[in-house]
Amino acid sequence: MRVIGKPFPRVDGGAKVTGQAVYADDVVLPRTLHCKFLRSPHPHARIVSIDASAARRIPGVKAVITGADLPVKFGILPVTQDERALEHEKVRYVGDPIAAVAAVDEEIAAAACDAIEVEYEVLDPVMSIEDALRVPRNERIQDYGGPNNIHKLVALEFGDVDGGFARADHIRDDVFFFQGNTHLPMEQHSAIATYIDGKVTLWSSTQVVHYVHRALAKVLELPMNRIRVVGAAHGGGFGGKTDPFAHEIVVSKLAMLTGRPVKCTLTREEVFYAHRGRHPVLMWVRTGVTRDGRITAMHFKSALDGGAYGSYGVASTFYTGALQPVTYDIPAYRFEGCRVFTNKPPCGPKRGHGTPQPRFALELHLDKIAHDLGLDPADLKRKNFVKPMTQTVNWLRVTSCGLEECADKVLRASGYRDRKRVAGRGMGFAISSYLCGAGTAIYWNDMPHSEVQIKVDRGGVTAYCGAMDIGQGSDSVLAAIVAEELGLQPRDIRLVTADSDSTPIDLGSYSSRVTFMAGNAALEAARKMRAMLVEAVEAAGRRYEEVKFEEACVLAEAKFGTLVSAGSYTPPKIAGPYKGSGVGPSPAYSYSACVVDLDADARTGLVHINKVWIAHDVGRAINPLLVEGQVEGSVYMGLGEALMEEQEFRKGLHKWPSMLEYKSPTFLDVPEMETFIVETDDPEGPYGAKEAGQGPLLPVIPAVNAAVYDALGVWIDETPVTPEKIVEALRRKDKGEPARVGPTRFPNIPYPACIKVEPPPRELNASPAAI
Amino acid sequence: MRQSLEGYARPVVKNELQRDVERVSLALDVNGERSQVLVPVHKTLLEVLREDMALTGTKHGCELGECGTCTVLIDGRPQLSCLVLPLQVEDRAITTVEGLAVGSELHPLQQAFAELGAAQCGYCTPGILLASRALLDVNPKPTRDEIREALAGNLCRCTGYVKILEAVELAAERISPLPHSGRGSG
């Protein structure tokens, strides 16, 4: 292959290094009005009255709207339509939007927000998982779910769990806590809307053009054909721009009311409160093993602190239980999950969505079991690795699987087995797996998840696709695939992406789905186009490889008329036969393995990461340069979550809502990384490709904690691993107490009786359709 | 930097809030072009560049001096444009990302960033390019640690910084190749 597998530069590199890429806040239109929000100062309150009359009188104010102007509720998941663009009845977290102003400049808009008078009846806030499980002091945060402030309860059992524990030689329980953290994209969310001739156009920094389109149609009560949503150049998402947001709806409404373009760019503080980031999750896990370390049964419980709204939370809850059996062969498995509402910014998907927390717990739990049995954790884990072409106990279909090879690569390169045992220096090993796109759409339908059209004329090729390049390089992947098939270079392909007017549907940049799904759609469209070109050239008595591309185009257009082709991708229907089986299935899974080497200072608790080795089974690297970039970025973000990133709230307020106080790794904090790309040629991925954007983050976090144990003999069973926690754990160790810092108990949660599911046959019989 | 308003024409106009807004007329030298702007005295250089001069290549991540995204060069030294008042930099040479290329020929840093994938979402890229340019101007052969130090005030959430470090090193090598023994020779 001439393009696939080669390190081509990104197709958008030139625009980005010259400052010419147009991000949403760079869109400047004549007569643009500026929008500002009035947000709740209370974490939980009823709104008694809103008086905006003084704000409306301020010269330069063109419109003031409140919840009464946008009463229709929305939400990313059909089952949790619980948000309003502006709340006029009740606020549920500090920052909940109440009113919005469009004015001739930002200063006037801000002054008008200050002039709006809101009378509140303040309610007791619910600020923790424990608190949410209790009877509320005055009223529940949401009026659905329950009991108390429970949002969602899940209880599933696959196979004979009690029998599995009865067979075990050793059973161990552990409790872990994964602290919440946020995406911290460099770009503040921004959106600008126009309303011309009865039609709304919105440019936004979103990851999911299609879902924003749907939410706008619902809340603005306009048909989708009267709305156009365009994804502007994207300044970073990591899951944080995957929900439809209030500001996107509000600028559209304000444009409709004023007849002028209206823009809103969130302040950095507002970005922290918009959130939708990593759920804080408390976890309890019990595993039974045989004497030689084979897992006989596992029981996993999770409690997610969801914040004030549903967001992706139902899916997040299932994800805390779904992927454990995708890395380890667990013959019997019970999962009980719970998400609660609290008066904090809503949590949602962040890189790894719902799976970094259980991965953290599971890897450390297995490390401890290995130590109990006198085995090396890497050996115990390898004994239980899933095999390719199998089905998990919870009905997930594993096709290609490079887990063995990934583990081999990092264990060998790091010298893990021969490491010197020196106090204060340690290594940790962990593995993981992630989806290559959610196998089911967010709203139920039978349509394709991604579609691509190709137009060819006069030697020019344009590919159209709704996919949104959020920096991961999806545009470059599309260009590479079309170029490969047509015998061109990526730079020869013009791209039109992420525009609901001119591109066919793609569901967006989430769940690591774009390479797999849009890639397959592009492959189909490109092969159809190539077939037309070849047919026309051969009809002229020549061979395609011999003629210039421009000439082939002329021959084909003369023969067929307008040269267009289309391709689409629909994931296979592989969800298991039980309620809740829609979360977890994916047409393929990526696999990663990681070794972290670090120094940990027993006196100060300071951790210095020396090096990270990471191997990632990407199926096939369509562009190894982009894959490395995704892997390195994942390692970085994982280290941030492991060592410093966290958010906490005091009296409803974010304690660190700024980029200085919310600690994230700088150039000085990132260690040397050695990346191994492992290729397993997935049978259904485009050219065998899977994903690279999320999976490699997952093993990094537990590998850090395992390395700290290796260095100092103390367990930090929660994130982040701060110096204070290490010093405290060492103090406990010296006093003869358990040498750990972390949660000690898991609350009583009223899980329902488990739905019992018969496991599928282990071997995967039907060979997947080759593409 | 100039600390006083003395000697400036200061037309005072009422804005629509009926607040007095003192405007200053300033001559700014941006990317070698001298322009006259009339701006409210409190407006930051970041805002003036983006809103009054249409130089939207300069980005912003916090507008509080915390993230480095809005870095520009003032007399060749990196400064956070969100913390600079234009008044302070009149008659100083301001360089933004738009001033890095010569015509359509990219600066070696831009070339290296594009080639190696050092820009993913690209939002921190203009600031990091300028901070890197300032480093290479004074230290043409920086060690990796010196690059880390020079760029430590610029956050990037996409790359893990690895490809950026490699791109700065590649650009340094291209700008001033080592005599005789380049990498891999000898």
Image: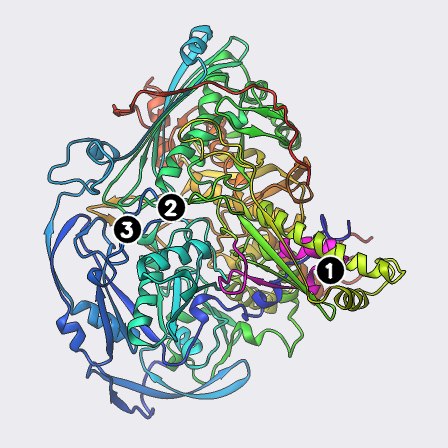
**Residue B125 % position (x, y):** 53, 63
Label 1 or label 2, whichever comes before in sequence order:
2
Label disc, if present, on residue A489 of the rendered structure = 1
Q: Between tags 3 and 1, which lies in front?
A: 3
Rendered image quadrant of residue A37:
bottom left
Q: Give the range drawn in magenta.
A: A476-505
Label 2 or label 3, whichever comes before in sequence order:
3
Q: Nearer the viewer, residue B185 or A658?
A: A658
Residue at 25% from the left image edge and 76% from the top image edge: A62
Position of A522 compared to B46: left or right? right
Q: Name the residue under label 3.
A: A83
Q: Which residue lies furthest to the right in this view?
A: A541
The chain identifier of the residue carrying mark 2 reads A
- Residue A480 colored in magenta in the image: yes
Are discs 2 and 3 both within one chain? yes
The chain identifier of the residue carrying mark 1 reads A
Identity, as a three-letter code, of the amino acid under mark 2: Gly
